[in-house]
Amino acid sequence: MQAEKKLFNRDFILVVIGQIISLFGNAILRFALPYYLLKETGSSALFGIVTACSFLPMVILSLVGGIIADRTNKRNIMVILDFVTAIIILVFYLSLGRIPIIPLFIVALMLLYGISGAYQPAVQASIPLLVSSDKLTVGNAVINQVNTLANFIGPAISGVVFQFYGINLILIVSIICFTLSAIMEIFIHIPHQKTPREVGVIAVAKNDLKDSYTFLKREKPIFISVIFLVCIFNLVLSAVLIVGLPILISEVLKMPDTLYGFSQSALSLGGLCGGILTALVASKLKLKNLYILLLICSVSVLLMGISLFLELPAIVSYWVVTVMCFVAMGVSTMFVVQIYTLVQIQTPPQLVGKIMATLVAVAMCGQPIGQMVYGILFDVFIQETWVVMIVASIASIMISIYSKRIFQKLEI
């Protein structure tokens, strides 16, 4: 029966439409909320600290999200989380201007990012239950493209709306999006077989971490070196882009909100192009040369810093920053795809999910620390932001060069 399922059956179509609506609401929120905080406070340090705090629940819940999805009805997870998100945004909308902005944003962003970390595993886990095994790759591709499209279109539209109508309209639209998505998901039928709950979710997560560590230490110690390298790279380079992009475009170059939205869309477009390019040249990519991709990312940030140091016209520096963000995101996507493929090939099937969740969580751990540090540094060097960008890029170049000896030990 499973083999006879059509790809675009009723339930899968409802999941896709629900994802389009929900992810669009998510994308405009992820653009607008941190950006509004920066515009209102003008503090890079606060911006870095708040975004770092909001990132932590996503890291933690991404570890347990898959476990929860395996033990609970996936449709119910999606419906409940979309409704809860709509309620959180409604409360935020009603509280804005009545509650101090800093605690309000910390709580709201932590909740929203935490929900995001728990939501996506449920969606990914539902796909094999809705499409036949021979259509699974296409089904995953459709969901991933919907995600990419939302992240591409969302910031661009959000930037225009933010500039001309402010944040309130964005909040109202996102409430409508999540409510519609939840209502639509109620009508999805996802097969679910109840499993006995012998141990709790936390205990399962601990066991998964233990199993992952044991496998990595005994069988693939090189993976540990790679993931800690990526963690440090995220701390040094990824964090400077996450915190630095809105600060550079809004506070330093004084560009309008629409152009910041365009830059965020350029990041997503870079990721899309990077994924396509990886598929086209996969046979020519060598693991021992992965350090070159990190080097290109580092040089991209160096060029941003140089454009600021030279005090070029603001619009010229803006385009340098935007184009280099596109390049950095494209190249980093190529890097991530290669690492994911390596792990999937060299890990036993029954351990792939655990190992991937562990590696991703460890890799992301560096980002919140980096976001806090860079937020403070951008505050200190607000008149010479090029210093932060160039120092970060030089440190990243050194890490990239060092990584060569690690990647040379990788093989498929």
Image (cartoon, rainbow, N blue to C red):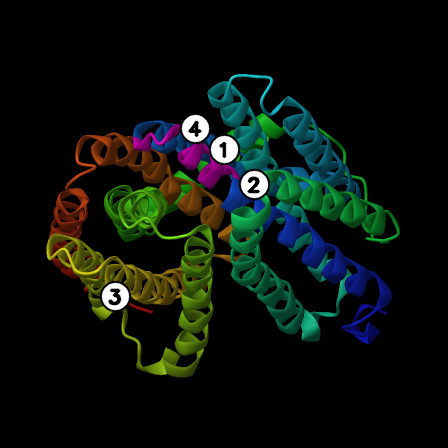
Rendered position, 297 above or below 195:
below
Please report contact status of discs 2 and 1: CB closer than 8 Å, yes or no: yes
| Residue 93 visible in the shown view | yes
Please report contact status of discs 1 and 3: CB closer than 8 Å, yes or no: no
User: Which of the image's four quarters has the N terminus?
Assistant: bottom right
Q: Which one is earlier in the sequence, the residue at label 1 or at label 3?
A: 1
Q: Which mark is residue 293?
A: 3
For badge 3, the amino acid type reads Leu
Out of 387 and 218, give the one closest to the viewer: 387
Out of 317 and 225, give the one closest to the viewer: 317
- Mark 2 neighbour class, 10 Å CA radius: few under 14, some 14 to 19, many 20 or more: many
How far apart are the alpha carbons under marks 1 and 3?
A: 28 Å
Furthest residue toward right:
187
Q: Is residue 91 left or right of residue 378?
A: right
Rendered position, 227 above or below 98:
below
Query: Where residue 100 appears, x then y in whole percent?
Result: 51, 17
Q: Which mark is residue 53?
A: 4
Query: Where residue 407 appears, x then y in whole percent?
Result: 22, 61
For badge 2, the amino acid type reads Gly
| Magenta span includes 37 | yes
For badge 4, the amino acid type reads Cys
Magenta span main SS: helix
| Residue 74 visible in the shown view | no
Q: Which one is earlier in the sequence, the residue at label 1 or at label 4?
A: 4
Q: Which one is earlier in the sequence, the residue at label 4 or at label 3?
A: 4
The residues colored magenta run: 33-44
Q: Which residue is mark 1?
A: 60
| Magenta span includes 178 | no
For badge 1, the amino acid type reads Ile
Q: Which mark is residue 50?
A: none
Secondary structure of residue under mark 3:
helix
| Total count of labels | 4
